[in-house]
Every structure is written in C-alpha cells, then in structure tokens.
Image (spheres, grey):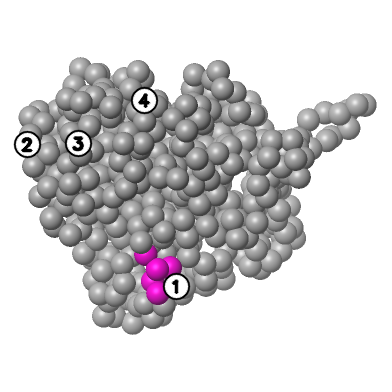
Amino acid sequence: MLPLPPGSVSNGEFLPAAPSARDRDVYAATLRVSDDAARRAGIDRRQFLQSAGGVAAALVVFNLAACSSGPGGARVRLPGGSYRVPAPSDVAACEQALADPSGFVFDVHTHHVIPSDPWVQNAPETVQLVLGMLPPDCMAADPLECVNRASYLHDVFLASDTTVALLSDVPNSGPGDAPIPFSDAVGTQNQVRELGGGGATRLLLHNVIAPNFGDLDARLDDMTVQALTGHLAGFKVYTAWGPNGQGYSLEDPSIGLPVIQRAHDDGARVFTAHKGLPLMRFDVAHNGPEDIVAVSRQFRDMNFVIFHGAWDPNHQEGPYDPNATLGIDTLLRSLDAHRVPPDDNVWVDLGTVWRQLLSDPDQAAHALGKLLTRVGQHRVLWGTDAVWYGSPQPQLMAFRAFQISAEYQERFGYPALSDELKANILGLNAARLFKLDPNATRCALAADPLTNAQAQAAHLRAEGALPSAWRPHGPTTRRELLRWLRSPTTHWTPL
C-alpha cells in the first residue's frame, strides 16, 4: 500500500472518483521506482514504502507525471509546482528532508468516531460513508474501531509530527446521529490531556450545530451551554445540510444570523463553515462561500473559517476565473465583491484540498497560490481531515517538499513557498487564530510523555523496528494504546 496513493481518495464524507488511467499509471510507476530504490537501499519494498523514502518515491513520480511532451517528443516540466526531494534510495536523507519534529504543526481539521454511540443505528448513511473509506487491511471485528478514539490518538499524535489538533465532526442533526457528540469530544480532549501528563493544550474542540433541524431556540440554548463548558474553541456549521435536503444561508435572518449572533454573544470568536466539497445529499444552492463572506462584514470582531476553501472536485483549478461557478474562484470573487482585504477576518483551511491535489502539482500550485495571494499568507491554515486519510504524516512530508515555480510566481503573482511561509501555514497562523503561544506550547509539551513516545516511535519506524503507521488503523482500544505506549519497544515510561 502506497503512503500517498494518486488520484481521488475519500475523506469519508464523499464518494471518490474511480481511478483514472493516469492514476493507474502513476501507481504502477511508483511501485517501479520503489522497487529500484529499495534494492539500492538494501531493504525490501514493504519496509521501504513504510519509510520517508517511500513518500519521496511517490513525489518523484508525481513530478514526472506533471510533465508533457514537448517538440520532438521531449519531456518538459509543466510550470506549476513540483517536489524537491532527495533520491528516494537515500532513506536517511529523505527522513531529514521531509520530517521536522522540531516544528510547530497545528492541524485544524481532524475527525474520529465513537463506534458505540447511537449514530450507528440512527444514521445508516453516515455509517456507510465511514465504512466505505476504511483501509482494506482493517481487521477489527467492528470496522469502525479502525477510526475510533484510540486510532485517532495514535495516528495524529504518535504517527505524525502534529503538535496541536482541532477535533471536528461531520454533518448531523444532533447528538443522536453525531459520530462524535460534543460530550464525547470532551472525553477525547481529557484523554489527550491525561496521556500528556496534564500539560499544555494539545487538542481543541469544535461543536457542530444544525440550526435548521428541530427547534431553533433550543439549538441556540445548547450553544450557550456548550460555550459555558470552557472546552469550546469554536462553532461549525454545514449550511448545505438539512432536512429533506434543504440547506440555509448564514445571511438568513430567521436561521443563520441568530446563530452567529448567539455565538458572538457567548464569546465565541471563531466560526467555521464547510464550503465546497459537495457531500451526499447536499443542497448545492447553499454550499457556496458568498454568505459567510458577507456576514464577516457584519461581525468584524469575529473570525470566519471556510473549511476546504470552497474547493470542489468537479472544478479544475487554474488561473483565477471570476466567472467560475465552482471552486476556489467563487471564494475569491466573493472576497472581491464584499471588499474583504487579504489577511482580514476570513480564513481558509486545506483539509482534503491538499490531499486531493498533491498528486497533481499544477492544480496544487494554482490552489495554494490563489488562496495565499487573495485570502492572505497569514490566513491559510493547515488541515488534513485525518483520521479519515490515516496519519497526516505523508501529507506533511509532501507539503514540506512542495514548491511553486518561479514562472507561476511571475505570471500569477503567487508567493514562493519559503520556509517561513510554510511554517505559518503549518501552525503559526492557527496559533494566532486560537491565541496560542507556539513557543510556550512547544516548551510545555517538550517533556510530556506523549511527546517522548512520539519521538521514540518516529525513531523506531525510521530504523524499521516498528511498522508504518501511515494507515487509518492501529490500537483499537484505550487499553491497547496504553499497552503500546508502555511496551519495551517504545521506551515508554508509564505515567
């Protein structure tokens, strides 16, 4: 199994497109490059694919696949984006170039499920979506255990360089059909704190609200109750989700505006909406970014985060087209229409966007370039949609290696992806949004047990002493996770 399969990969919220001929060719080419690199490195292919060299092999092939035929059949690079990586066979160099455990990584878009909760009976369509994106090697008696709380803790905090994460949920009408109700999310937050020795904040929480289901006043009162718990980092909505397939607008004075006003009155200063990435049974009329951009002008002391940046898999990302009806261009047009300057109170995250586009460097360059140029270099947030895609580590590695070409910088005004800019995207921007001191946070977490286990696990995987954790599975219960942490191979010191 490749660490970065090419083409469309579902995050559990939508059905991916079938592999194209190009995807199949890229997959086969990656295996060939991996075979050769593994032979040169003196290890078998399975072990190689579990290393940073395996990620580098995929990125090398993505570079090659982004080439087109020039005059006389010569191969020429498309001018958009590319990956700068060492030779895949030099596994040690790949580990050094693609991993940076000393950095500050704040993933604002993560998920898991609680397999024993009522949603399993009450929301069969959601269950099928989750089951449809599980890995083929998920061997748990209950497959939902492969994306449960323990797997989440393992994949996000032990199998990646992630420092801080924000836990979210998928569309639902309330606790009865939510894969992770807010009370269970608090339970995950408490467990992370316990495993970390009770130190600094490592996990923040969203609360998903559905004001168009049931009694609106009751929903508003629930918002106040949750805000008073002290666990809430912000509210999130799916405006395209609703009873009988009917969504709503955040500008609607009977639904949307009262929700934002209540969030404001309760002290919430971060309000998030899913925009773009049309899910099953979505009301596409209410899935565009126009309403959230518009209300950002009315609530200037709040910050509005657009999950997925309005990206749509049905639209090919290219240079900005003000007439586009789908995709990131609709967000840019809305920002222009409402005169929202760059680096204002509208933010975007890269959840699923980066994962879906990373095997197409040209599209990836346009998507990142447009967001950074128009939304602002301090307003683009790192998000991965983990744990649906497994550990976010391969996504992190790919992003660290990605470059926007000098030609695209000159032609379209896109910024160079400097180390400083990447550090902002990967964590510093989110730290500003949620008012975390990244230096103080890292210092507080440096000596906690979870950080030590994370570093030891990365070291052992690099040496081949532990199998790859870059899949959406792992320990499936809290007991198994604790046993893994305390096992002799992890050099774990029990709490």
Mark 4 vs mark 1, CA separation in Å: 37 Å
Q: Residue at x 59, y 41 (%)?
A: 373
Amino acid found under the numbered disc labelled 3: Val
How crowded pointer 1 is (Cα within 10 Å; few <14, some 14-19, many 20+) is rated as few
User: In the image shown, does 475 or 458 lie closer to the viewer?
Assistant: 458
* Residue extent of the magenta highlight: 436-441
Secondary structure under tag 1 reads helix
**C-alpha separation, residue under disc 3 versus residue under disc 4:** 17 Å
Disc 2 marks a residue whose amino acid type is Ala
Q: Which residue is mark 3?
A: 259
Q: Looking at the rendered structure, which numbered label has been put on residue 439? A: 1
Residue 200 in view in this figure: yes
Q: Label 4 amino acid?
A: Asn
Going from N to C along the chain, the mark reached first, 1 or 3, is 3
Is 227 magenta? The answer is no
Can residue 389 be seen? no
Q: Position of residue 461 (x, y in %)?
A: 51, 67
From the viewer's side, name the closer residue of 396 and 17. 396
Which circle's residue, 2 or 1, is located before the other in the chain? 2
Compute the Cα span from label 2 to label 4: 25 Å
Q: Is 440 within the magenta?
A: yes
| Res 287 label | 4
Determine the residue positioned at 46% across, 37% down: 340
Q: Main secondary structure of the magenta part?
A: helix
